[in-house]
Image (spheres, rainbow, N blue to C red):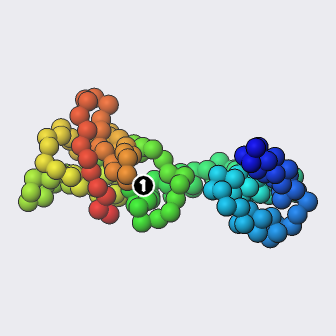
Amino acid sequence: MKSVFAVVITIISLPLSASSVPLTQALELCRAEQNALRRLTCYDSIQHTAAQQNNTAVQALPVQATPAAKAAAKAESSDSFGMEHKQNNDDSAEQLAVTVKSLRYSPRKELIVEFDNGQRWRQLGSDYYSIKVGQQHLIKRGALNSFFLANDNNNRTIRIRREQ
């Protein structure tokens, strides 16, 4: 009987806290709730109604981007590819097509590749990877800010890290 009464009270109080009561009072009502699940649903209802009010209040017209602006945004995206861990950017590309400009090896036999866009990447590990100057390769994004160097001609990939 007590649980039915509590559910009825919660259901009745949710619309009141979301629509007719000011935000600060609604937050206080939610904060006073002892049950964690009911407190969470109370906060969710406040957020949901606030989002609905914002969507109905502000209606912006979509802005059409010019081809020049799109090209500039793409160039900026490729310049920062691999450096996202030092920036907070969620609109990153998943892969980048590059052409090999120069190759060299570190003292530990790790491959160091410079691409035509000026980026320099170092291999993590010492696995064999067939690569030549002038070839087209892909840098693919992996999990947890990791990157892989791949080629469409073979199935091998190596883990790499951007140096510059």
Q: Residue furthest front?
A: 1
Above or below, 108 relative to 131? below
> Is residue 76 found left or right of 59 in the rendered image?
left
Label 1, on which residue? 81
Question: Which part of the image, by quadrant, shows the N terminus?
Answer: top right
> Is residue 97 found left or right of 101 in the rendered image?
right
Q: Position of residue 135 (x, y in %)?
A: 28, 39
The foreground one among 143 and 97 is: 143
**Residue at the location (50% across, 54% down)?**
77
**Residue at the location (86% across, 67% down)?**
22
SS under mark 1: loop
Q: Position of residue 8 (x, y in %)?
A: 81, 46
Does residue 33 appear in this view?
yes
> Is residue 129 found left or right of 87 in the rendered image?
left
**Residue at the location (88% across, 63% down)?**
21
Question: Which part of the image, by quadrant, shows the C terminus?
Answer: bottom left
Q: Residue furthest right?
A: 20
Q: Position of residue 130 (x, y in %)?
A: 18, 38
Above or below, 145 relative to 4? below
Classed neighbour count for the residue bearing mark 1: other residues with Cα under 10 Å, few (<14), some (14–19), many (≥20): some
The foreground one among 95 and 133 is: 95
Residue type at numbered disc 1: Phe
Marker count (numbered): 1
**Residue at the location (35% across, 58% down)?**
118
The foreground one among 37 and 22 is: 37
